[in-house]
Image: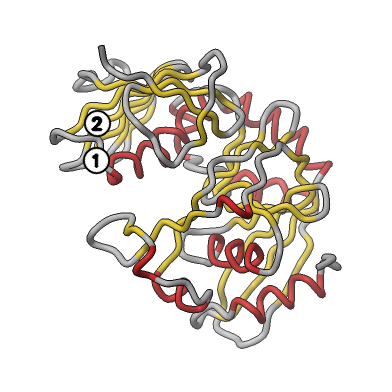
Amino acid sequence: MSSIYNYTAFGLNFQSEFEIPEFLSGNSQPDVSIRIGRVPSELKNANKSGVSYQATKDEFLLEIDNIARFYVKKGTEIIVEPKHKDIDKEIRLFLLGSALGALFVQRGLLPIHGSAIKIGEKATIFSGPSGVGKSSIAAYFSKIGFQVLNDDISVIDSELKLNPGFPKMKIWHDVAKKLELQINNLSEIRPSIQKYHLPINSVFCNQALSLERMIIIQSKNTPEFECEELTGIKKFNAVKNNTYRYRFVEGLEKQQDHFVILNKLIPKIKVYRVSRPQSSIQLKEFADFLIKTLNIDV
């Protein structure tokens, strides 16, 4: 009989046919099952299609060349069809990324593209486009004494709680050097890129928190840092546009659920647009600016 693994992450319980070492162990009734099997070659009557995905109201199909195909159904099931024999870290990378992102949308949750830390008794999300420094600044804050809830995807539920993900972050080679980490002790995310898994067990916050603020990071060509608090439609659009894989929402016919949870969340949080110099990220200077500007207790 094949082994069955039980995990907890993002406020959900998972039961999987294969190991997902990134997740924490759990033993509660599963909300989501993950298994290996054949998946449909295409979705009938797809509402939306992209280069690598198709979506209908209840189904989502993702294909990653030479790695795997993923089928996500009704927010309760993920089927993985590997392109090769083993479930490896590359397959898990996409499982824990776009496949889970689709599942969260199917369940009516709000996944934000960002890394979250605990400040006081509430959560702060660093959001923004890929490569802007979300994980980097969250990792730096963890180094100076703050706990981390999420990396890359921060999931908000219907009660507006931000649920912890799992105790690992993804950081680039240059950031690891700035944090004075030994690269030899870290595993690569993919063989072709210099990005690594960083275990954060000692600074992981395994507790759902209310969200206090979102800091949306962008880069610019001038040397100083800048901060603007967003209000009104700018605030709404900033949060909406930083939904993780926002393009999936329409295809999964979850626009109404998405709008409702955004409308509940927006009045309860502060949203800031913070601009940093486009050159290599200055972690200490960036953190010092945020601490001073937002009156963060250290």
Q: Quadrant of residue 80?
A: top left
Query: Contact (CB < 8 A) between labels 1 and 2?
Result: yes
**Does residue 95 appear left or right of residue 167 in this picture?**
left
The residue sitting at 39% across, 35% down in the picture is 20
The residue carrying mark 1 is 64
Marks 1/2: CA distance?
6 Å
Q: Tell me: residue 110, above or below residue 293.
A: above
Residue at numbered disc 2: 69
| In the depicted structure, whether residue 75 falls above or below residue 138 | above
Q: Can you say whether 180 is above or below 127 in the image? A: below
Packing grade of label 2 (10 A; few <14, some 14-19, many >=20) is: many
Residue at 82% across, 65% down: 296
Position of 103 with respect to 288 (left or right) is left
Identify which residue, 19 or 277, lies in the foreground: 19
Give the x, y percent position of residue 125: 66, 53
Residue at image x 68%, y 79%?
225
Q: Tell me if mark 1 has few (under 14), some (14-19) or many (20+) residues whose alpha carbon lies within 10 angstroms of its own.
A: some
Numbered-mark total:
2
Q: Which amino acid, mark 2?
A: Arg
Horizontal placement of 117 versus 43: left or right? Answer: right
Return the x and y of residue 34 as percentages of the image width and height. 37, 22
Q: Amino acid at mark 1?
A: Ile
Give whichever of discs 1 and 2 has the lower sequence position: 1
Give percent across and percent down for residue 70: 30, 29
Say what secondary structure mark 2 lies in.
strand
Quadrant of residue 216 within the rendered picture: bottom right
Quarter placement of the C terminus: bottom right
